[in-house]
Image: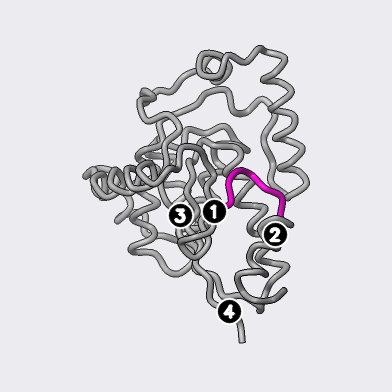
């Protein structure tokens, strides 16, 4: 019989290490198929909560925020691309030239958790990562969000109502505040059974070992 485990995946749609972390976790879960029964929920975190809707040129943004030089940015981008490739995720070269506000995407992910079938929130999260990092599309734009909703088989009419109404804004703000108050200041933050924290875009082996230990498989 498989062991039930719960994972809270705290992340932002515009965070490349979050995409790497999720694909790493997917790999680990595939290796443990049938041995653990995982409930996975995605929790909101905004790296840039004050970002304007039209976004900002990404190199300009990263230089201002971290003081990184063009060479450092290029080196990090290539490192991220290579890590993604080993996990089967494509970071589109030259596609992602802006960083955007992601609050609306988090509202939609909250809705998907409440109204979607099991696994639909995860599918939507993955679709949003692909839209942004692989194709360079704005994950805060209404048409992009609805395209992702359609891709994963969620109700586009209901999703449009959520987007246009501003629904779940308070709920997302409350969850963001909760994790900030509990010391989460960088993402991804992967919390296992509400107690064990794995930070950063770790390789699959790290997730697999932690899950095995919690499930009593080691």
Mark found first going from the N terminus, 3 or 4: 4
Q: Position of residue 67 (x, y in %)?
A: 58, 14
Q: Which residue is mark 4?
A: 3
Q: Position of residue 123 (x, y in %)?
A: 52, 57
Q: Is residue 135 above or below residue 1?
A: above
Mark found first going from the N terminus, 2 or 1: 2
Q: Which residue is mark 3?
A: 42
Q: Is residue 23 left or right of residue 186?
A: right
Q: CA distance from mark 3 to mark 1?
A: 14 Å
Looking at the image, which residue is at 70% across and 63% down?
A: 209
Q: Which residue is mark 1?
A: 197
Residue 27, numbered label: 2
Where does the magenta region start and end? 197-204
Q: Secondary structure at mark 2?
A: helix
Q: Position of residue 208 (x, y in %)?
A: 69, 62
Quadrant of the frame with the C terminus? bottom right
Q: CA distance from mark 2 to mark 1?
A: 18 Å
Label 2–label 3 contact, CB within 8 A: no
Q: Is residue 161 above or below residue 114?
A: above
Q: Mark 4 Cα within 10 Å, few/some/many (few <14, many 20+)? A: some
Relative depth, front residue between 19 and 5: 5
Mark found first going from the N terminus, 4 or 2: 4
Q: CA distance from mark 4 to mark 1?
A: 19 Å
Relative depth, front residue between 132 and 197: 197
């Amino acid at each position: 019989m498989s062991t039930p485990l719960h994972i809270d995946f705290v992340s932002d749609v515009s965070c490349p290490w979050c995409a790497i972390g999720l694909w790493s976790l997917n790999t680990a879960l595939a290796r443990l198929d049938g041995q653990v029964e995982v409930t996975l929920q995605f929790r909101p975190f905004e790296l840039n909560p004050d970002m304007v809707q039209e976004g900002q040129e990404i190199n300009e943004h990263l230089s201002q925020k971290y003081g990184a030089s063009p060479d450092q940015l290029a080196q990090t981008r290539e490192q991220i691309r290579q890590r993604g490739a080993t996990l089967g995720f494509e970071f589109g070269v030259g596609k992602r030239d802006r960083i955007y506000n992601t609050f609306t995407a988090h509202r939609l992910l909250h809705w998907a958790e409440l109204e979607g079938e099991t696994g639909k929130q995860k599918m939507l999260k993955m679709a949003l990562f692909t839209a942004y990092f692989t194709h360079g599309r704005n994950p805060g734009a209404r048409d992009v969000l609805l395209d992702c909703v359609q891709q994963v088989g969620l109700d586009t009419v209901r999703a449009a109502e959520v987007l246009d109404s501003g629904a779940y804004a308070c709920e997302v703000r409350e969850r963001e505040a909760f994790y900030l108050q509990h010391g989460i200041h960088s993402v991804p933050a992967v919390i296992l059974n509400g107690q064990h924290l794995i930070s950063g875009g770790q390789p699959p082996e790290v997730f697999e070992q932690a899950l095995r230990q919690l499930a009593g498989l080691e």
